[in-house]
Image (spheres, grey):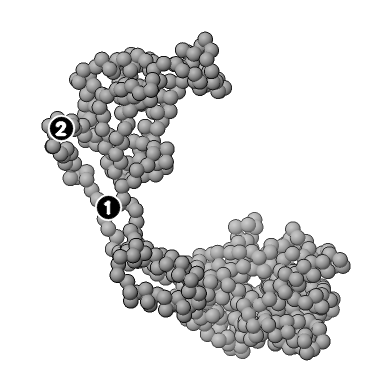
Amino acid sequence: SDGERRMTNLRHLGELLQAASQIHPGIEELLKWLTRAMRLADGNNEDQQLRLETDEKLVKVVTVHKSKGLQYPIVFLPFAWTGRRMLQPRPPLAYHEQGGTGRVIDLGTDQLAQAHRLAETERLAEDVRLLYVALTRAEHLCYLPVAPVSFKRNGKRSGLPDSALGWLLYQNAAAGNGDVEQLAETVLEMDDDGLQRPWRQLAETSAGSLLVTPVPTEPGNTLTPEPLDPERAGAARTFAGPVPATWEVTSYSRLSAGRHFLPPAVDLDLLGESESGEDGSHLRGDREPRSVFSFPRGREAGNLIHGLMERLDFPTADGEALATEIDRQLQHYGFEREWQSVVETLVGKILDTRLGDENGFCLRDVRATNRLIELEFHFRVDSLEAGPLNRFLRDYWGAGAPPAPLDFDRVKGFMTGFIDLIVEQSGRYYVIDYKSNHLGNSASDYGCDALARAMLEHRYDLQYLIYVVALHRYLRYRVPDYDYDSHFGGVFYLFVRGMEGASDSQNGVFRDRPARLALEALDSLLLNRDEETTTLNA
């Protein structure tokens, strides 16, 4: 109930700490300053006084132009009865052509009287528009003082006879012909009854929404508005119920980490310790021959590989074009240029390794028009708990390789993430992810069993299953007559250090294609449906 008050205090303290940090750098010094400031606070310094949590209750004085598009609970229009009519035609006078769109400025021709009449008509039209804006700013109540006052100043007359309000109320009395001069003279000659008659008519037809109250004539009296009908003077109810705090945007990274303080779209394989247990500062090349296995590990290595594969055109990634891009990326991520030939070899093997069986494809076969890079997704998660998801994953992998259980709070909201690459080949769609994990110093260390262990150790199984659900939901809306069995080709996780290029070896390539039953079960689990999820097998 006091959320605005709390947030105002926090923002206030944040601003004070930010300013103090320029003089007292570092957490320790800043804490000392804050402790001292709290101990010596006397309330006399303006910085120590509570700020208003909102300016909604303040009186705001604004022009009609600035108020456009805004609303206020109560509006006072103290000068709506004033006009700004020029009594004598004085150049320059600006107006638009009658029946046309051209803008005319009369600098003193023999048609000045006609120009004056047209300019005054346009001025009145603009005043009517502004009056409409002013009257429609009020949410509940609008005070509109009106008086039959007219005065002259600097050759201009101002008052009710010359105002938009006067024209709206009394144009019928001036034969309704829109003549500004005739309207002003008619209003000036009216008696009190004639001036009040339009207001009484409006009040009678307003069903009580318009109250006309005369201003007291005796000095010292206070104007007391007539009370509103209690049945019409309702107030909005105050919401006092609980606000659910379980809605959030989550990701594979947060679920697999078992904690909820990671940013929602963090990819763990791009964090420093996720792939090798090292922070990326250890350069094995200082002690070993430079090769794909001694290439530095950690976050920057992953960023380099991902950045390269995003920017390369696979079919033409060779020769000078490839060398130039690799040199640019090495400099960008802070690697020595001596790694140039190693990275060229690595990229060549990634592009030329055949994915799948002898009928598979190479990334070098994939044109730019047949791929999506870094596809960001958000899809709905109605209710997801660790227990049901762990049971699903155990059933999916079977008894041979039970993954470590996940531990996270119940999730409701959206699942988000980025898929490195989606490829379409021969009418089938594939999820591809690049991994720079170091599993050993020879290609044989990246065989089928080693990759399966790495997938479960880092919980990449959860990652690619989420990716498959995201792509499945995406294709249902994008591909006519979409069918999972016909259109989805599978998942390839490319452990790039172990890939061997144009050979029959599948070292470094992890492949899976979840069965339709498993996919639909996981999709239902994320949507909190009741379909069976306990008899699944890849």
Percent position (x, y) of residue 145? 26, 32
Whole-percent x and y of residue 422?
68, 66
Q: Earlier in the sequence, mark 2 or mark 1?
A: 2
Q: Amino acid at mark 1?
A: Ala
| Side of 285 relative to 75 (left or right) | right
Q: Say which residue label 1 marks.
A: 236
Question: Where residue 327 sits in the image (x, y, percent)?
Answer: 79, 70
Above or below, comparing residue 370 to residue 218 in the picture: below
Nearer to me, 96 or 232: 96
Q: Quadrant of residue 345?
A: bottom right
Residue 402 sits in which quadrant? Answer: bottom right
**Which residue is situated farthest in the right direction here?**
319
| SS class, disc 1 | loop
Q: Residue furthest top?
A: 110
Q: Visible in this render: residue 26?
A: yes
**Foreground: 39 or 121?**
39
Badge 2 element: loop
Neighbor class of circle 1 (other Cα within 10 Å; few <14, some 14-19, many 20+) is few
Does 337 sit left or right of 257 as displayed? right
Q: Residue 239 location, x and y as percent?
A: 29, 60
Residue at image position (79%, 89%) is: 288
The residue drawn where x is 26% and y is 37% is 143
Q: Is residue 361 visible?
A: no
Residue under label 2: 216
Whole-number angstrom distance, CA of label 2 to CA of label 1 = 33 Å
Q: Quadrant of the N terminus?
A: bottom left
- Which residue sits at x=84%, y=76%? 341
